[in-house]
Amino acid sequence: MNATQERKPVVTRFAPSPTGYLHIGGARTALFNWLFARHHGGTYLLRIEDTDRARSTDAAIDAILDGLDWLGLGSDQPPVYQFSRAARHAEVAHQMLAGGHAYKCFATPEELAELREQQRAAKQPMRYDGRWRDRDPAEGGDRPFVIRLKAPREGETVIEDAVQGRVVVKNAELDDMILLRSDGTPTYMLAVVVDDHDMGVTHVIRGDDHLNNAFRQLGIIKAMGWDEPVYAHIPLIHGADGAKLSKRHGAMGVDAYRDELGMLPEAVCNYLLRLGWGHGDEEIVSRERAIELFDLAGVGRSPSRFDLKKLENLNGHYIREADDARLAALVAPRVAALMGRDLSADDTALLARAMPGLKPRAKTLHEIADGSLFLFAQRPLVPDDKAMALLDANGIDLLVASAKALEPLEDWNEAAIEERIRGVAETAEIGLGKVAQPLRAALTGRTTSPGIFDVLTLLGKDEVLARLKDATALGVHG
């Protein structure tokens, strides 16, 4: 970092292309930019790189903004839309042309295709040969032309990358890239550099698939006499098997982690933070702690491996830590979808009361929703096969005894309920679990549920007695 950059307030940016959802790798890039800015008291910006008009869509923009908001990574300022700045990009290209740092190229598509074929046949690198670099543009007449960068041909370009270290490329390997197309529209490479400069970006933190671009983009920066940003190129994310991340590994949109997998945003952010960055052995890192600790020195150079099981385990931790009312609000729509009806305010309140029993074993919001269905089930319940097996003659006898013990209770509270059910076990001279098993089957229709006393308390006396009666009849007729 040079002296100028040390004096400047830190400005980072996340610059997605709106051609699809916000993928998990993009979300990690946004997180690293956001954390670096926060750690240094700087500014985090968002730029929508929508210059590909054929593929950019409003739906994709909305999905990106929605995903960032869900993760708590919204921009500090309104987003910049790259396409709207095309005139500014063209202005810089013409400034470079006037300053001798760019030139007009009148090569036709057919000539360039022939050049590529010759290079392919000779097994040479396919790059533009600079045929118009030193020619008089008057020779082109009124033919269409592009504006190309007059890149240096001697020496080398060096990047002191904050993640990759010192990276050197011979200038002879860099071609005179197009800045402005023949229709006057700017290329992506030009637009990125101009936007970063105009937005005051001091640190370009992005995937290492852009590292080669940095050497070419520096040609524009140096030609314009602009300050060079600090580059930090982050290794990409691979699947658990080491292969390039694909949908089978979990390469879905951020919205799918929320909607389809039932993840909490703090779990996703914590997991993404630990994909390629670390501080000692800390695995659980809160947002506040991440801001305190995050710096580029902690980012590794090797690709990270995405493991959905690890994310699920981490999500389970955050579910256990989450506020019960918040979880109930998140789970309620999922329960409603499973049941095919909306939940009332009373239903949601019941969900919140049930959370201490529902969330300890759950790894996703879907698991909580599924585990809570017994609360809203319509009588008579239809037990699954495993539960039905517990409603044998012995199980039915225990249900009858439990109903008789519970019916006189006027104060329906967990302590009183537990005392009565333990009495049933003692009278039958069996362990409490032997009574709990048929009770759970009768009251939830399953063999797994929250603690049996939680179940009894939450359902209420009338519903408990009614379900026990149903199950007794079911056992008799079964």
Image (cartoon, rainbow, N blue to C red):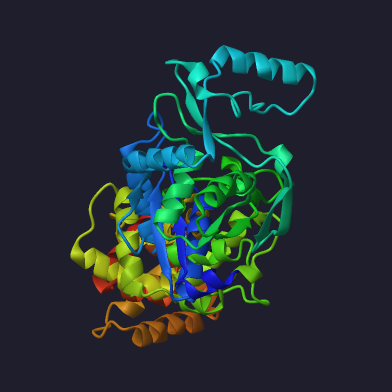
Instruction: Tell me residue 143's x, y (percent).
Output: 45, 15
Task: Compare residues 306 and 180 and report the one nearer the observer.
Answer: 180
- Which residue lies most toward the left here? 345
Seen in the picture, residue 473 relative to 141 is either above or below; the reply is below
Seen in the picture, residue 395 relative to 172 is either above or below; the reply is below
The residue at the point 33 percent across, 53 percent down is 79
Seen in the picture, residue 30 relative to 86 is either above or below; the reply is below
The residue at the point 29 percent across, 53 percent down is 336
Instruction: Tell me residue 156's x, y (percent).
Output: 72, 49
Task: Compare residues 262 and 174 and report the one nearer the observer.
Answer: 174
The residue at the point 32 percent across, 66 percent down is 328
Instruction: Tell me residue 327's x, y (percent).
Output: 36, 67
Q: Say whether residue 395 is visible.
A: no
Q: Say whether residue 147 is visible.
A: yes
The residue at the point 67 percent across, 54 percent down is 305
Instruction: Tell me residue 268's x, y (percent).
Output: 50, 61
